[in-house]
Amino acid sequence: MDKTININLGGTLFQIDEAAYGKLKDYLLSINNKFRNVAGGNETIEDIESRIAEIFLSMKGTAGVISSENVDDMIKMIGKPEDFDQPGNETGDHGSLYGKPGPRKKMFRNPENSIISGVCGGIGANLNSDPVWIRILFVIFAFFFGFGLFVYLALWIAIPSAETDSQKKEMYGGQHNWAMPQEWDQHQGNRLGYAINEMFRALGKVFYIFIRIFLIIFGASLVLTGFLALLSFIMIFVFKYPGAFSTNVQGFNIAYLPDFINYIVSYAAAPWIKALIVAVVTLPLLALIYGGIRLIFWFRARDGFIWLSGFVLWVLCAAALSIVLFNEGASYGNHESSVSLEYLKLPSDTIYIEAGRKLSDIHTCNEISLPDAGGNGYNIFISDEKKEIYIKTHLELLAVKDKSASIEITRHSSGRNSLAAIENSKRLIYNYRISSDTLYLDEFFSIPPASKWSVDFVGLNVYIPEGTIVHIDNDIAETILRTRYNEDFLSESKNGFWKMTHSGPYHIEPYESSDK
């Protein structure tokens, strides 16, 4: 157990451990050497000792014993002896608080003469003027479009508070009284100024209460918003929980975005993109939550370095994500298509269009839905088991004067250049077949395994001679069919038969010769 020593400091008895006693002894010796040959130095030394006693009493130490850490904290608050090198100390001229100008002052907020934050008190100490007149000026300018209020808030943020004795000494230019805090009373100014100052003090307390209530409400909203956004992001991006989203709603469904990333970027870039997305999204949300907690509880923390480090990290992650996405996005720079055309031999003047492979045959709930100009939607189905992507096709029926029916398949895709885009379009897998007078069309096409999505699309145009009777399967009519004619054709195409004419198809009653 360390040896303890009893000392009398400023009329107060303290217990101090041996190591702390050595530090304190050296510090007081340096203070004594600094001021013993200065006019009024003995009074200054006594004031400093009294101030040290006040600080030790506030610290209370560990089990009532002053430790080396307590002595170090005290020295930080009062300052080292070399910090007392202020012109005017040698003459012992401490002056009055608002007397003649003092030497080399620094701007601080004055917590000892504050109404709200000490801005006006600090300006008054710096300018050797009564803070009450500065407060009046701020109030006057506050009526000019709130100019005074904005300036006050800016100074509140920009000017640090004088918390330690060395900072207070710098604020007053060496005129700070070490024995007790500087307080405003009726002896430091005229009675009118004192009355106005007290009025401001009362109004300031009311204003402070309103500000605190507002900050608590605002901070709570920040915490709630940040927490809910972070929770939603984790549920979607990490746990892939789609409960809050609907694939039936027209629009981008982000519930399966993490899975989709694996199919739209290169294999090597996918994990980096996911990690960078997590960092870019979560860092601001964590900052939002932490900032809200600080506003609610109004605590002080030396977290400037943490804020700066977090901001720098976020900027680096955002920049890296932008570079990676730009490099991956270059593969979508050109959009090209390839077209194939096949003539159909129909044994009669009636053609039946039915579904081959159906969208309902795709057993996966991993779907992304995007709107398109035709209103049918652009639906992407991801099969993680087979590592394949299935995309809904679009079908359009067109009347032609030619007597030959035909099917035209247009495959669209993207690439870094036109040649690559054309090659990508040729890899798209789409199947159809014709049997007698029935054309079987798949409702989707697929992308080969290990191939990534490149804004792929397959459009079907079936050219039917004028006068031909068309019967469309219900599944085809409800999923992939779209038309440039009228809405009645889309709504009623699954009921009965239609006759193709130059002006578009029109509904006819079923007749036995064409009925299957």
Image (cartoon, grey):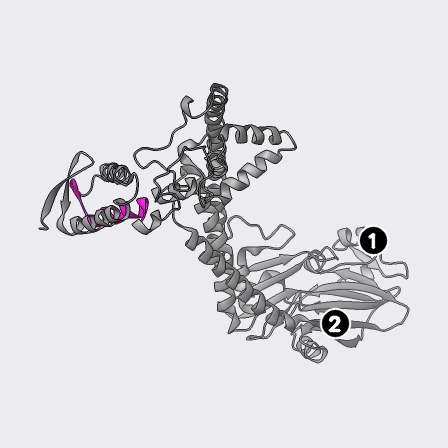
From what the image shows, is residue 434 above or below residue 193? below
Q: How many marks?
A: 2
- Give, as a three-letter code, the residue at label 2: Thr
Q: Nearer the viewer, residue 430 or 424?
A: 424
Per the rendering, the mark at residue 442 is: none
From what the image shows, is residue 328 above or below residue 6? below
Secondary structure under the numbered disc 2 in the rendered image = strand
Q: Which residues are magenta?
A: 63-80
The residue identified by callout 2 is 410
Secondary structure under the numbered disc 1 in the rendered image = loop
Answer whether residue 515 is visible to the viewer in this image. Answer: no
- Look at 45% across and 58% down and name the residue there: 309
* Residue 113 is one of the magenta-drawn residues: no
- Look at 42% across and 21% down and name the residue there: 186
From what the image shows, is residue 212 above or below residue 88? above
Q: CA distance from mark 1 to mark 2?
A: 23 Å
* Residue 79 is one of the magenta-drawn residues: yes
The 10 Å Cα crowd at callout 1, few under 14, some 14 to 19, many 20 or more, is few
- Give, as a three-letter code, the residue at label 1: Asn
On the picture, is 121 further left or further right than 77? Answer: right
- Look at 35% across and 49% down and name the residue there: 83
The residue identified by callout 1 is 486
Q: Nearer the viewer, residue 179 or 472?
A: 179
Answer whether residue 419 is visible to the viewer in this image. Answer: yes
Q: Position of residue 424 (x, y in %)?
A: 66, 76
- Look at 77% across and 60% down and name the residue there: 471
The 10 Å Cα crowd at callout 2, few under 14, some 14 to 19, many 20 or more, is some
On the picture, is 361 further left or further right than 163? Answer: right
From what the image shows, is residue 266 above or below residue 376? below
Mark closest to the chain's N terminus, 1 or 2: 2
